[in-house]
Each structure stands twice: as C-alpha cells, then as structure tokens.
Amino acid sequence: MPSVSVVITTHDRPHLLRRAVESARAAGESVEVVVVDDASTDETAEVCASIPNIRYVRIESNRRVAGARNVGLLACAGEYLSFLDDDDLRLPGSLDSQVALLESQPEAGMVYGQALVVDQTGAQSGRPYPASCPRGDVFWQLLRQNFVPCGSAVFRRSCLYRVGLLDDTVPGLDDWDLWIRIAELYPVATLEKPVSVWRRSSPASGQGTSQAAALVARCRRQWLERWMMLPRALDATRPARREAWRHFSANMANHLVCETGRALACGRFGQAALSASAALRLFPLEVARAPFDRARVRAVLGRLQDKWSALEARS
C-alpha cells in the first residue's frame, strides 16, 4: 500500500502533465499518483497511457477541478492524501518529510509547507509563500486568509470521514474550504520550507483563479453563508466574529486592488474594471478606510494613468 496518494487533475494540458507526475514520484519513496482526466478532448489519454505506474481515471463530462479531485480521492489507496495541479511541481523528498511530521504528531489532521511562486513563464517571483507558516489551532487565521498553497498540503484520509469531500459548488475555493473544515477539528502542522512550485495564474491565463471579481464574490458568500455556520464559528463571541470579518474584508479588498493593477499591466481593462468595482461594491468600508499598501495603490494609479494617456494619444 502506498503511504501517500497524490491526485493530479488535468484538462487539455498534456504538455505539462508528465513533469507534474515525475515530480510527485520524486517527492517520496511510496507514492501513488492518481491522474484524473477531466473530459479532455485532446491527446491527454494517449499521453497518460505512455506514463507507467499511474492510476488513470477518465471522466466523460467535465466536472471542473473540485469535482475531478473528488473522483481522484475516491480512487486513492494511500493513508495520506495530497493534491497537485498539472502545471505545478512537487520538490524532491517533500512528501516523505511531511508524512514523517504527521506520523510524529498523531493529533494533527494535516501538514503544509511553503511554495516557490513562479509566473506563467516559470520564472520565480518573490519569496516563498507564505513567508511564515502558522501552525496549531489555525481555524480563525484561515477564516481571514488562505495561506496554505494547495499543492503543499498533505492530510490524513481519516479526516475526510469526518469533514467530507471537497465542496464542488465553490470552484476556486474548494481547497480553502477543505482546510477550514479540517482546521476546525484538528491542529495543523507545518514544514517551514519550500515543498512545491506553484505557477500563479495571470489575468491573461484564462484560469478560474484569474477571474478575481467573480472569485471574491463567491468567497464572500461562502464566508457568510457556510463558514460562519460551522459549529465553532457559531459558538464564538460576537466580537470574535466581527474581528474575523474585518480581517477577511481587508484581505479581500487588498487582493482586488492588487488584481486591478495586474490586469491593467496586462492590458486587460475589462478585468481591471470588474475587480475595482467589486472592491467598492463588496467591501466599501474597507476601501474607504484605505487599509492597502500605499506604494501598491500609487503603482496601480500610475499604471491606470499611463494606459489612459496612451488611449488619448491614439484618439
């Protein structure tokens, strides 16, 4: 039996898949790789057939990432489970190190590490994320912000028997939702060093996570209608809930401001307008309080002015 199973979901990106599979295998000595083909329409099936010793599962109707991950989880045999996107990578030996940490802390439900963040070209950008790794009881911290890179987490199969599978009704938030439900019941361990390579989406990449306005609106609904309905949140004091909402709102507003700037830099004016209007509509108090990095705001406004000047010059 494998000690850890890695679920890799893929859809029409066979050119990236082999690297992801090889990195997962190099991350541990007893690793099962489960590749879920989410109704690809290209040569993905042929590519998977050429990769030895993987468990290949094909879905005939597209279920998006969360639905495909659930199919993979049900096909896994390992005691420990992890996800890996087909454009991300695992670092050598990282799964073995994280499993060893979980075995030394039987009370912990999951362990996560840092991710090396790269852009769409593969160039590393900035420091590993997160800069510091909260551990132990992180339930309220996770309600404020998702600091767990999806491909860096390893969790126990037994956790799923208590918290259930991924929620496939919240695409783009399914991993964050799972971490919160695990953290409500279990301590979380950390390996404070890079364990994965995370290719960050861009406004031009077309990935679901690149649609910032829609994703944040969905996240706000999930926070109010689901996460605050969890037993531990319901039992909390009103000041504790207000404090969590304040931090969550500030983080989401800051994220939208950042994504506005990124969209402008890529010439995606429509996406920039959507992100800016979403910040004003969903979190007006946080925008009014201006809790943002002032240098970042100045940079966004400067890029907006440059783009506007260029448009005027053309006309």
Image (cartoon, rainbow, N blue to C red):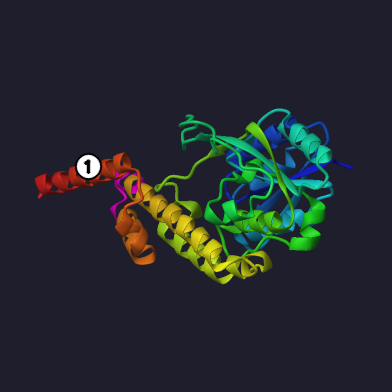
Which residue is drawn at the image coordinates 48% and 57% (left, top)?
248
Q: Quadrant of residue 31?
A: top right
Q: Is residue 85 something that shows in the picture?
A: no
Depth check: 185 or 31 in front? 185
Side of 71 where 152 appears, left or right:
left
Which residue is drawn at the image coordinates 63% and 62% (left, top)?
63
| Residue 191 placement (x, y as % from top left) | 68, 35
Three-letter amino acid code of the residue under disc 1: Gly
| Residue 238 placement (x, y as % from top left) | 54, 68
Is-magenta flag for residue 268?
yes
Name the residue carrying label 1: 302
Mark 1 burial class by Cα count in 10 Å: few <14, some 14-19, many 20+ = few
Q: Quadrant of residue 222?
A: bottom right
Bounds of the magenta segment: 262-269
Which residue is drawn at the image coordinates 45% and 59% (left, top)?
246
| Residue 240 placement (x, y as % from top left) | 55, 61
